[in-house]
Image: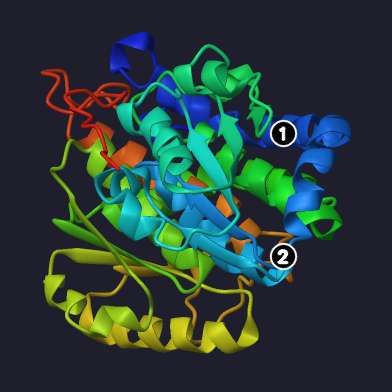
Amino acid sequence: MTTPSGTLSLDDGAAHTVREIAQQPALWREVDRIVSASRDSLDPFLCPLVARGDLRVVLTGAGTSAFAGQVLQPALARRLGRRVDAVATTDLVADPRGCLAEDVPTLLVSFARSGDSPESVAATALADQVLSEVHHLVITCNEQGRLAREHAELPKSHVLLMPPGSNDRGFAMTSSFTCMTLAALLALGGSAYDGVAERLARAAESITDSSAVDRTVGALLESAPERIVFLGSGPLKGLAEESALKVLELTGGTLMAVAESSLGFRHGPKAVLNDRSVAVVYMSNDPYTRKYDQDIYAELRGNLPAGSVVTVSADSGAGTEGTGTDAWPLPGLDGVEDVALALSAVVYAQLIALRASLARCLRPDNPFPSGEVNRVVQGVTLHSLHN
């Protein structure tokens, strides 16, 4: 992979993060094989549940894992024809009776890189306590994690393990996020997504293997911006949230990052803009939704200096959506649903975060050396819920 600082050594403190961004296309192909090979056990678990008209699907995780649910929710709701909600474990643990207020048959889909974060196991236990009937699909990158171990033999649980390499050793979740999201899409979305992993992998390879991409990312950050805004609609709103978190994490909070929907940005969050701001607009593949993305892009181009606003799009055409270094392409993804588009598009955000971190002389593999923020969350006290 072409990297923001040329040839990296272990002393750069970025070796894990660089490798974990670059390995994603290969891992996505492996995820596709894993889900296909799991069908004999996965389908008997999922199909009877999805066939139930009263089923509620809850997608849950913390931080980046919660954003996986946000990316997936709109597409899975349409595909399954069932109620699908994205609820962070941090919300569910704090207010289980509110988040699970309706006592209906529920499929709790838990995303967890390590499976050792305090909220991961607590969320599944609280769901069992609050609901009369709950089934668990655990998607995790760590076979030895507590979440995987506790659910491995339970009759109402199915554990779907990601490739071992997806258990990122770097601070920020990169390949773990994309692998778990893809796995859930393939597992729950069915044959509608046959072949999509290969298309996504090829698009991502065109990004990670390109020196031109390094130059365009560098051009966006050349002015040393103080603030960066990520905007997207539908599933791409969840992508925007994850993109902003990557920048905050890898820059140790020194680059303010904000995420919103293309329409929602005008309703207050636009106040974040100043003349040291840059913006990334994720363009929807849906022709109707895309119009709103185009509108905010045109508006931002009138508000910010030249070169400060870029689009990420499956269509690299000119016109109102940027040209040259202002239009960042996702080749071969025309017509792909936004839920899948997000997985290749996030690679751009990962590279922005990596380059911004290195520019600040930080170590992306551990941007918080004093330990105030940890790879696996610490310091959480779990309290008992009394009936």
Hey, what amino acid is under mark 1? Val
Q: Give the class, few, some or many, for how many residues have Cα within 10 Å of label 1's Cα (few <14, many ≥20).
A: many
Residue that appears at 72% across and 51% down? 188
Q: Position of residue 345 (x, y in %)?
A: 54, 55
In the figure, residue 274 lies in which quadrant?
bottom left
Q: Which residue is mark 2?
A: 80
User: Which of the two discs, 2 and 1, labels the residue nearer the N terminus?
Assistant: 1
In the figure, residue 279 lies in which quadrant?
bottom left
Location of the N terminus (image quadrant): top right
Mark 2 vs 1: CB contact within 8 A: no
Please, is residue 216 above or below residue 120 in the view? below
78 with respect to 263 (left or right) = right
Residue that appears at 46% across and 63% down? 102
Location of the C terminus (image quadrant): top left
Q: Position of residue 207 (x, y in %)?
A: 58, 46
- Disc on res. 203: none
Q: Position of residue 310 (x, y in %)?
A: 40, 68
Q: 176 and 127: which one is in front?
A: 127
Label 1: state its secondary structure. Answer: helix
Q: Determine the CA span between mark 2 and mark 1.
A: 21 Å
Please, is residue 40 above or below residue 205 in the view? above
Q: 83 and 297: which one is in front?
A: 83
284 with respect to 161 (left or right) = left
Q: Is residue 330 visible?
A: no
Please, is residue 53 above or below residue 266 in the view? above
Q: Which residue is mark 1?
A: 31
